[in-house]
Image: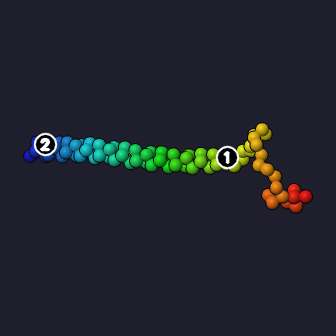
Amino acid sequence: MIAEAIDTALTCGWWLAGWVIVLAAALTILTLAVTGLAAWCGRAAWRGVAGAVSAAQGLRALRDTEPAPDAPQPPYSPATARTWKEAA
């Protein structure tokens, strides 16, 4: 009778250990999948923000550039004057 109880306890122990290993493996795979998905989403967001910032800086740089001194200037006319002093 005692031998059967010990045998049953060992069997249940091995059964429990097996389930612990299976669940640990499943949680490990799930954790790696979630981490990979988060990294992929983070990289996509980072590239999107970096692209938007780069485009904004490029537009700002184009807006802030002035023509070279030796570049031909458009002809001046009073109609294009911005103030009355320029027109005079």
In the image, is 58 to the left or to the right of 83?
left
Q: Quarter holding the C terminus? A: bottom right
Residue 9 x/y as whole percent: 17, 45
Q: Residue at x 69, y 49 (%)?
A: 63
Q: Residue furthest left?
A: 1
Q: Secondary structure at mark 2?
A: helix
Q: Nearer the viewer, residue 43 or 77?
A: 77
Which residue is labeled 1 in the image? 62
Q: Secondary structure at mark 1?
A: helix
Q: Distance of mark 1 from mark 2, alpha carbons?
A: 82 Å
Residue 72 x/y as whole percent: 76, 43
1 vs 2, front mark: 1
Q: Residue at x 87, y 56 (%)?
A: 86
Residue 40 x/y as whole percent: 43, 46
Q: Nearer the viewer, residue 55 or 28?
A: 55
Disc assigned to residue 7: 2
Report the amino acid beneath label 1: Leu
